[in-house]
Image: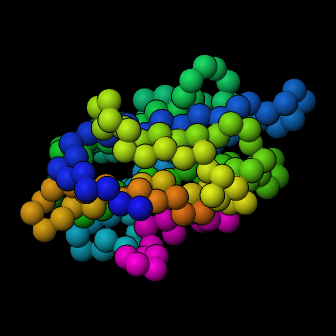
């Protein structure tokens, strides 16, 4: 599904999930963003922003990081300032990955998962990952620059099965319809 929203300036990606039950290894989900250049819009990202990092130019920032899902409301929040991004970037892909260090976990294994993408107070997209419950990671948003230079938003939840490193390497690849 895509939206007719154009010229998007600044978005917030918010992720939530319930902690694991007592005695079980912690559920650790991460927001990952990767900008892709005009020279290689479907290849490798120019860089990745995820836990303990931010973009070199400060346009993508992880404001809140959680390794357990404990707390009220959204556990991780990332801000993406598209209006400040250099013209060399054609796409920004945002995904969610589940850490797999304590055995395979899918979205269906974790209670009350949810992602919300906002521009100001406007909700661009929301998902509970039910459509990809067997996946270990998912692309949740594609921001693309059109021929006029304006950013557009394409809402998609596309599942992936693999560890976070494999997902990060493949999340910007072409999909049917691209």
Q: Give the image location of residue 38, x and y in percent.
A: 23, 69
Q: Which residue is located at x 43 percent, y 29 percent? A: 63
Residue 116 seen in render: yes
Q: Quadrant of residue 12?
A: top left
Residue 124 part of the magenta-drawn span:
no
Residue at 48% in and 49% down:
32
In the current view of this chain or complex, which residue is farthest to the bottom?
176
Q: Is residue 115 left or right of residue 49?
A: right
User: Does residue 58 appear to the left or right of 48 in the view shown?
Assistant: left
Residue ranking furthest to the left: 148
Quadrant where the N terminus lies? bottom left
- Image location of residue 121, percent across then percent down: 32, 30
Q: Residue at x 57, y 57 (%)?
A: 138
The correct choice, above or below, for 46 with respect to 109 in the image is below
| Highlighted range, magenta | 160-178
Q: Is residue 66 above or below residue 59?
A: above
Quadrant occupied by the C terminus: bottom left
Q: What residue lies at 18% left-to-right and 65% top-to-bottom? A: 146
Residue 164 vs residue 107: left or right?
left
Residue 165 location in percent, x, y? 59, 60
Q: Is residue 81 left or right of residue 177?
A: left
Please check the rendered image and state whether residue 163 is part of the magenta-colored stretch, yes or no: yes
Residue 166 appears at what percent x and percent y?
60, 65
Residue nearer the viewer, 94 or 108: 108
């Amino acid at each position: 599904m895509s939206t007719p929203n154009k010229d998007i300036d600044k978005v917030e990606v918010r992720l939530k999930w319930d902690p694991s039950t007592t005695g079980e290894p912690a559920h650790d989900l991460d927001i990952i963003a990767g900008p892709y250049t005009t020279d290689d819009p479907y290849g490798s990202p120019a860089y990745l922003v995820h836990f303990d990092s931010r973009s070199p130019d400060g346009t993508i920032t992880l404001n809140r990081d959680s390794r357990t899902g404990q707390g009220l409301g959204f556990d991780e929040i990332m801000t993406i300032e598209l209006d400040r991004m250099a013209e060399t970037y054609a796409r920004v892909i945002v995904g969610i990955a589940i850490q797999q260090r304590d055995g395979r976990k899918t979205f269906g294994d974790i209670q009350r998962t949810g992602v919300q993408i906002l521009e100001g107070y406007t909700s661009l997209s929301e998902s509970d990952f039910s459509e990809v419950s067997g996946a270990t990671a998912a692309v949740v948003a594609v921001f693309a620059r059109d021929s006029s230079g304006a950013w557009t938003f394409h809402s998609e939840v596309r599942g992936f099965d693999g560890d976070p490193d494999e997902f990060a390497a493949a999340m910007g690849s072409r999909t049917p319809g691209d």
